[in-house]
Amino acid sequence: MKRQVHIAMQVNNEPVEVSFAPYKTLLEVLREDLNLCGTKHGCELGECGACAVLLDDLPVLSCLVLAVECEGRRVTTIEGLVTYGRLHPLQEAFADLGATQCGYCTPGYLVTAKALLDEHAHPTRDQIREALAGNLCRCTGYQQIFEAVEAAIQSSAERGEAKLAPRSARPEEAQP
Amino acid sequence: MKENTLRLIGKPRRRVDGRAKVTGQTKFADDIMLPRMLHCKLLRSSVPHARIVRIDTSRALAHPGVHLVLTGKDFQVPYGILPVSQDEYPLQPEHVRFVGDPVAAVIARDELTAFEALDLIDVEYEPLRTFSTPEESLEHEQPRIHDYGDRGNIHKAVSLAFGDVDKAFAAADEVFEDTFFYQGNTHLPIEQHASVAAKDPDGKLVLWSSTQTPHYVHRAIARALQMRPAHIRVVAMPNGGGFGGKSDPFHHEIVVCKAALLLDRPVKICLTREEVFYCHRGRHPVLMQFKTGVKRDGTITGVHLKTLLDGGAYGSYGVASMFYTGALQTVTYHIPTYKFQGCRVFTNKPPCGPKRGHGTPQSRFGQEVQLDKIAEKLAIDPAELRLRIVEKPDTLTANYLQVTTTGLTECIRRIVAASDWKTRFRKLPHGRGLGLACSSYLSGAGLPIYFNDLPHSGVQLKLDRSGGVAAFCGATEIGQGSDDVLVGCVAEVLGIDPLDIRAVTGDTDLTPVDLGSYSSRVTLMMGNAAIQAAERARELLADAVSRKLEIPKGRLVFAERRVFDAEDPDKGVSFSEAVCLAEAAFGTIGTTGSYTPPKLGGRYKGGGVGPSPTYSYSAAVVEVEVDASTGWIHVPRVWIAHDIGRALNPTLVRGQVEGGVYMALGEALMEEQEFRRLPKRLSDALVHKFPSILEYKSPTTLEMPEVFTELIENPDPRGPFGAKEAGQGPLLPVMPAVANAVYDAVGVRIDEVPITPEKILKALEAKAAGKSPRYGPAKFADVPWPETLQVPPPWEGGDGKAINSPPKAAKEPARKSPATEAVQS
């Protein structure tokens, strides 16, 4: 029996080839085979949202995605939010405004919020709540997270920045 | 230091570890990957209470990829967080006490192989009677879950009287008696516990772990593995949430240490979410009864509180938890006569321990709901009633706790104004309501967990010629911002930027002892130690600079990375030059600071739980909307005011307060640790009803109300820059405020948490049927209380000692323990 599978994918805008046992989830491959430990896990059953990453720019729970399904696809993790040494406005706002306490759920929030802002430049508080409802945070009480997302919207607008990363194809348009 | 000289303290600012957290670079225990690392999994008991007849590990050992299988016989010495409850083994040798109790460990090349091998271990159990409730444990003394404790399955029972409550009730105009039940719940940190152990290149043991208490874990490993403590290094990694759930030394920590020593390879364990539910150490379910005598104006004449705690299967912090259920009533309100009876029993469930608020939220709930009932009966506004009875500053309470400053009156005034209480309470349309409650909490336990007279926190500073400073402290960053407090205090005193300081924390090899991130102690204790260390360094620098510039020391200012003349700010040197001058004059510049709490507390047995250098205070108003047809509760808004003394970094303090409100709403409305028996045809086992995040409901972004937070700043002389705690106190008033708001909305009393739609409907049905409009326990349990210890309160001439000495409860001989203190020396 072949013990390892081998795939190529785009991780944080870099081409990556990786071999791993076929049962592994995207979460496990990111953390254990690609050393991208910024993505966390809290249940490995799709309940907590800590492992969220962007798959072709849409948030997914990486603990529920088999890595073999990711051949040829684009994955963005927390490590991919910093561009040329500059933090994403969401990262700046989360750090400044107390939206991160223990920091364990934070990567999941940041990638999920990034997907939201890439889709809607000016979401309302209710849309922010809705978008982040699949991510659990036990520290903050969420309020400073909402405020940080709103501040990031504001600071992006003030800096005249459109989306930091180019908007990509929807999953149905992506390569199978 | 004068307030107007503060540059950094009190101003909102990015936490020092903020960048690491938002870039995903904060390294948690499970992020440690070492060459040649093996993986460990624990086999946990599938039965709730049994003797282990036989364990056969041969098939597991033969499984390809398995390196080692450990069982109870590999560990000879019990351990436990409290010296009086050394009742745990890393793997149970002969007696399992709950579904989830570890019995064997497999160490294999990867997690999957270890999991596979668990199925190959054969364990034969001889089942014992299972105790699922405290009442069952009280009823049957045999079989005993533990062979220590007061008697039968009672772990500990106490009876304390501060004055004569019967006289106090006789002198009252009204006497109220109410029974409440507070369901247990768990911490649910998003990070699952993880640990990695390895032999370092010198052959000594290192453990990296998600723990809130590296110092206590250090001691527990030395004891359980009978090792020289100087050859053990425990590194507390930043915790992905703690809330008290990572405060005990855990089985898995000791097991991976043993395995790493035997195999001479790094060994990692990361618990599954299900296992985190079994580790637990969360909120004790508590049945309680409050009997309170009041005068017509609301003045309390006396309180008699009885609590019964469901401790689960082990001791953990339980004796302290039990005392805490009775400790802080007097710190919140003036209670001239007080009697407390508490009892903790063992049951066959995961052990309970300290969760945010440790033992105090349960009885806080009861007292605050009862005060709401008292206010209604006496026709006094509930806010006004509390303003009349708040404990006064600079008071020694009936049970000998010392209140220094209190901002509770101001807290109540602020939330009353902010919530428009006076025009809305009892005046909102049916289905909408407001409720109010108050609380107090420790800013650090006044006594350590094991007896000693050493400092509770130490800070060491090393000043570099570059102007950089390294700050070392054993305190553990669990998200609360302890690294930021450390750095903030040092930066303030030395006049440098927080980023010029490197915090090295939670490492028993490198950092001075700090007892750990529990009891809301770190800000106050580490903060004071940090200020002392920084002031000593500033003194050395000031000496050298004053000589060089010929300016009197008293005129020197440390600010903006400079040391300069207050009268001529251009005359000065850079901070790095100041360090060089001092180094030239005195040699290498390093200083230490430490903090030991003042001697506090009464000298009666039990007087050690409750004392704190100072107490924080909170008050909250909760608004609810209740649908009377479905019982559904919605909380749109919460107003909370917290007496913080001084907010060192208001951004972080606000986060602690609102995080407390959030966790409180979870407890109030949905979170519960529930158990059920499997059908007889299966195994009759008592199992956790839903050990998963999906089924253990907690509030999401959609349930979280708007929270209006006010910080009341009245610097306390004992706090660093006047600061008190923020991590636990603000949780406390929220649960009773929800219950009181439900009453305001639909006129039914839910004397129990969580307050679920089902309970509201039952109470509404009772009300419609003309019965008592209430849902809650009917009566308190039958507890065989020990003879009461009589401690006259200060105003009756007491000196904090008991005036009688009741005979000790008959005890079994102490369990044989090969552990000796000799290992520690």
Image (cartoon, rainbow, N blue to C red):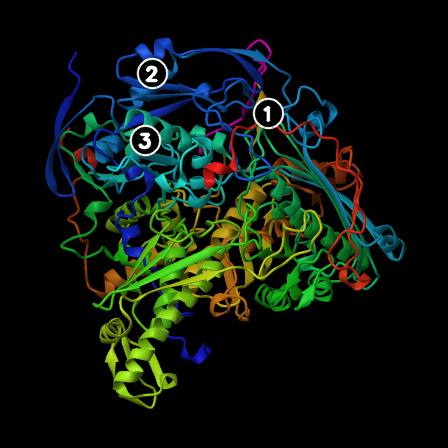
Question: Is residue B759 depicted above or below B532 in this figure?
Answer: above
Q: Chain of mark 2?
A: B
Q: Circle 3 sits on which residue?
A: B268
Q: Residues within 10 Å of mark 1 (few under 14, many from 20)?
A: many
> Could you give the CA–CA distance between mark 2 and mark 1, rounded to whole angstroms?
27 Å
Q: Which mark lies nearer to you, 1 or 3?
A: 3
Q: Identify which amino acid the numbered label 3 is placed on.
A: Lys
Q: Residues within 10 Å of mark 3 (few under 14, many from 20)?
A: many
Q: Which mark is residue B348?
A: 1
Give the left or right position of residue B98, taking residue A172 as reference.
Answer: right
Which residue is drawn at the image coordinates 47% and 50% (left, top)?
Answer: B515
Q: Secondary structure at mark 2?
A: helix
Q: Residues within 10 Å of mark 2 (few under 14, many from 20)?
A: some
Q: Identify which amino acid the numbered label 1 is placed on.
A: Asn
Question: Is residue B135 depicted above or below A53 in this figure?
Answer: above
Q: Which mark is residue B116?
A: 2
Q: Secondary structure at mark 3?
A: strand
Q: Who is closer to the viewer here, B395 or B698?
A: B395
Q: Chain of mark 1?
A: B
Magenta residue span: B678-695
Give the x, y percent position of residue B494.
34, 72
Are the numbered discs 3 and 2 placed on the same chain, yes or no?
A: yes
> Could you give the CA–CA distance between mark 3 and mark 2, rounded to whole angstroms?
17 Å
Q: Identify which amino acid the numbered label 2 is placed on.
A: Glu
Dots 3 and 2: beta carbons under 8 Å?
no
Are the numbered discs 1 and 3 placed on the same chain, yes or no?
A: yes
Q: Which mark lies nearer to you, 3 or 2?
A: 3
Dots 2 and 1: beta carbons under 8 Å?
no
Tell me the quarter of the picture where residue B274 sits. Answer: top left
Which residue is drawn at the image coordinates 36% and 50% (left, top)?
Answer: A128
